[in-house]
Amino acid sequence: MTKPLGLLVMAYGTPRNLDEVLPYYTHIRRGRAPSDEQLADLVGRYQAIGGVSPLTQITDAQARGIAAILNSDGGRPVRLYQGMKHTAPYIEDAVAAMHADGLDEAIGIVLAPHYSHMSVGGYQKAAREKAEQLEGPKLKLVNQWHLEPAFLDILTSRVREALAACSDPSKAVVVFSAHSLPERILQMNDPYVTQLHESGEEVARRLELKHYRFGWQSAGQTGEPWMGPDILDVLRSLKEEGYEEVVSCSQGFVADHLEVLYDIDIEAQQVAKELGIHLVRTRQMNDDKAFLQALADAVRKCERQGVEE
Ligand SMILES: CC1=C(CCC(=O)O)c2cc3nc(cc4[nH]c(cc5[nH]c(cc1n2)c(C)c5CCC(=O)O)c(CCC(=O)O)c4C)C(CCC(=O)O)=C3C
Ligand SMILES: [Fe+2]
């Protein structure tokens, strides 16, 4: 019997309770503890969304869902391993488990649609380095899947659905957003910005959108410049341009988590309210079957083609 293919599903990870926020934040900051003020600010944001993020459960449902699809599509059976960037089980733990289980080959996919050296590249580096250190399994990694047809279908339908909730869809403006990154990625020939435009433009084309913009959200406070405009400033300038209804599509994220439940649903909603703007957010992908099928498609493609650098 041939050995199963390892399926390494990688995601950001989130603290499981408020006590874990400090070690989590310290890990994100590569071992430097945050100031008391920064910590209190982050704890406050988790408290505002109910104390804990639903991300752990959603990642788990997404990972299991992709594995279930792959194990019923007639292709090579997979064995699922989950590895997080900033919480246990870490990416390195998952690779070590595949090695201990004697798997020869694995495919890795990150639950984020667009590639940046600073985001997906970091997950991949962690996986590659561990696999090299242990001398196996042999890894193939999906770099990006923002143009996977099934993903674009569902992204389009989520924007269509949000527009339908506007009182005058023809006058509403769609704002596509993703996690901001430090501006220095622009000097690194990083594909992130281009890819965000590619998926947003494709949705705009399919829906024949006349009014849409790109913005950034959730920028960090690190003392260096981050990419803008921030979505809050986009809302302010849209108001000046005369728009009264905005659809927010956080296309860089695939789950209901802090960056959506706080940064959009609380913070951006508050600014929209002050401006007198009706802000409608697109539903996140979460464990939607059609979405998980898109990821399964990306995994099979990577299995056939190898590493698409
Ligand atoms: C590109 C990118 C994605 C999208 C791609 C991907 O998914 O990988 C992403 C997703 C996420 N980011 C998340 C959480 C956080 N990210 C932070 C901070 C940072 N993110 C960064 C980048 C990204 N992050 C960067 C460059 C920093 C600054 C580091 C520093 O300071 O040097 C901080 C610290 C405080 C703050 O800045 O808010 C938190 C709490 C959660 C989980 C939410 C939950 O728990 O529900 C998710 C899905
Ligand atoms: Fe983050």
Image (cartoon, helix red, strand yellow):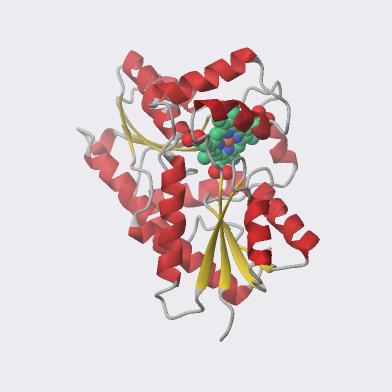
Q: Is residue 80 above or below residue 179?
A: below
In the rendered structure, the answer to whether residue 283 lies left or right of residue 112 reads left
Q: Position of residue 11 (x, y in %)?
A: 55, 48
In the rendered structure, the answer to whether residue 44 lies left or right of residue 170 reads right
View quadrant of ligand 2: top right
Quarter of the figure with residue 102: bottom right
Residue furthest toward the bottom? 1
Between residue 188 and residue 15, name the one nearer to us. Answer: 15
Q: Residue at 26% of width from left, 45% of height from top? A: 161
Q: Position of residue 77 (x, y in %)?
A: 50, 76
Q: Is residue 221 above or below residue 8?
A: above
Residue 291 in sight from this viewpoint: yes
Q: Is residue 40 above or below residue 198?
A: above
Tell how many labels: 0
Residue furthest toward the left? 167
Residue furthest toward the front? 100
Task: Work out which quarter of the rendered image holds the C terminus and state it.
Answer: bottom right
Task: Work out which quarter of the rendered image holds the N terminus and state it.
Answer: bottom right
Q: Residue at 63% of width from left, 14% of height from top? A: 36
Q: Residue at 43% of width from left, 19% of height from top? A: 236
Between residue 84 and residue 223, name the one nearer to us. Answer: 84
Residue 219 in sight from this viewpoint: no
Q: Residue at 25% of width from left, 38% of height from top? A: 169
Q: Position of residue 260 (x, y in %)?
A: 43, 34
Q: Position of residue 288 (x, y in %)?
A: 34, 54
